[in-house]
Amino acid sequence: MTLIYLFIFSIFLFFVSFFWKTIKRILRFRKFDNKIPGPPTSPILGNVQTFRNKSTVELNQIFLDAAEKCRNSKSNYMKYRILDKLFVLPLNGKSAAKILESSSELNKGDDYDFFEPWLGGGILVGRGEEKWRTHRKLLTPSFHFAKLEGYLEVFNTESRILVSCLDELSDSSNPIDIFPYIKRCALDIICAAVMGTKVDAQLYHNHPYVNAVEMFSVLVIENAINPIFQIPPLFWLLGYQKQKEECIKVMKEFSTSVISERKAALDSGEIEKETKKHKVYKELVKVFGGDEDVTYEKMSELEYTERVLKESKRLVAPVPMVQRKIISDMEIDGITIPSGANISISPMLIHKNPEVFPNPAIFDPDRFLPDEISKRNAFDYIPFSAGLRNCVGQKFAQINEKVMIAHILRNFRLEPCGVTKPALEV
Ligand code: HEM
């Protein structure tokens, strides 16, 4: 009996201390409810109701509409609050530069904590500056110009598989959502290029790793807008913890097995260590640099394709929002944002600023002609973020995109079908 009382008492203590801290933080951030514009907030919950039960598409629209209203009221920022978490969003490149150019405000925001059990405190989500610098230094040589050229073979091989998969479907009279195919191709490319492992997700659908990442992404969005995710006992009782752990288990088991296979191959001499590899790399480029495949030289001639790819990432930013949790108070438009608040930089919103990109909903690759680019602030177009914590894989991704698109478009004519349904696994 005493044990039961003790258990109930500790739960009670947990809730009192949890809510006490939460209420203190809510009171601290509530002053900003009126100082910076944003979707209407309720005193305690903030914007929980604004985002409740909304799909990703609806959420994006809520942000875009709110940003438009804030711009119309001449604000360069907007804010929203989920319970005790304050998020401030710069609405143009100049305002975003304030945080992105900072060499001290490098800490990722609160929402990244959710990734920690999966990705650890490493380069993408890690907070400690020293650790991040070490990881960034270790990773940067993998994206050196000479290395990138060596990945071309993988990009070409996997893109050819993608084309053969799409080929099987191209005679169908029904519209086909090609996103799941692109996604699996991207996974095969990243595993083959970065880890030297053939995953063949393109050939064997329902790859458990892809499914786990997909499920985890759904939880990430929920975590950002649903306060229940911030209350550990409820998160656990409602089964979210179990779902999260299952995803992480699959994802970790996969990466651990890839690393062990790679290590074993290195130890057995099956693959050579980095220092001995250059000759092999040159030979590979020489042997595989046929006409069919995309080469570096050909790639630099793809000026229009490049503009199309850039404009696509402007219109639909692949990473709609990144966050920094500020460690020192920050002055914004005469208002002091306190340490502990999050600054959310949203490429999705910044790329739709009509003062910089007139008629922002219109697809116009010529926005990326050199003369047009020179008129803009460098931070007005940031699909890969910017500053010290920009995307280390940017060049890799851009080359990857070009090779895939060169293969797809030489084999198929894609047409908009007017049907937008969620990208389900096919
Ligand atoms: C179209 C494809 C891609 C886009 C749009 C993209 C976008 C981004 C963005 C916006 C960030 C900043 C995240 C933040 O501040 O929280 C980022 C960071 C990062 N990206 Fe990418 N990325 C892409 C592909 C890749 C690829 C292919 C790799 C690796 C092979 C990669 C590796 C990373 C890493 C390691 C970071 C963390 C860098 C740091 O914090 O120092 N990305 N990416």
Image (cartoon, rainbow, N blue to C red):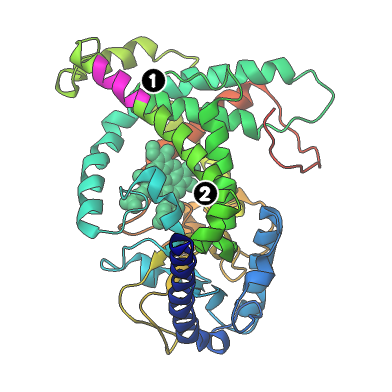
Residue 290, can we see it? yes
- Where residue 43 sits in the image (x, y, percent)? 61, 84
Q: Earlier in the sequence, mark 2 or mark 1?
A: 1
Magenta run includes residue 119: no
- Boundaries of the magenta span: 257-264
In the rendered view, tell whether residue 70 sits above or below residue 412. Answer: below
Q: Give the numbered dot on residue 271.
A: none
Main secondary structure found in the magenta portion: helix
Q: Is 262 contained in the magenta span? A: yes
Circles 2 and 1, Cβ within 8 Å, touching? The answer is no
The location of residue 357, given as percent across then percent down, is 59, 63
Check the image and name the residue furthest to the left. 275
Relative to the observer, which residue lies in front, 272 or 375?
272
Seen from the viewer's position, the closer of residues 16 and 240 is 16
- In the depicted view, which residue is nearer to us: 135 or 403? 135
Q: Residue at x 51, y 41 (%)?
A: 306
Which quarter of the rendered picture does the C terminus lie within? Answer: top right
Locate residue 86 relative to residue 151 in the image: left or right.
Answer: right
Q: Disc 2 designates what residue? A: 241
Up-down: is 21 above or below 348?
Answer: below
Amino acid of disc 2: Gln
* Residue 197, disc: 1
Instruction: Rate crowding at label 2 as few (under 14), some (14 to 19) or many (20 or more) other CA atoms within 10 Å.
Output: some
Image position of 370 (left or right of 348): left
**Residue 374 visible, this angle:** no
Q: Amino acid at mark 1?
A: Thr
Q: Secondary structure at mark 1?
A: loop
From the top left corner, tell me how far across and down residue 401 is, in percent.
50, 35
**Residue at 32% of width from left, 14% of height from top?**
284
Per the image, label 2 sits on a secondary structure element best described as helix
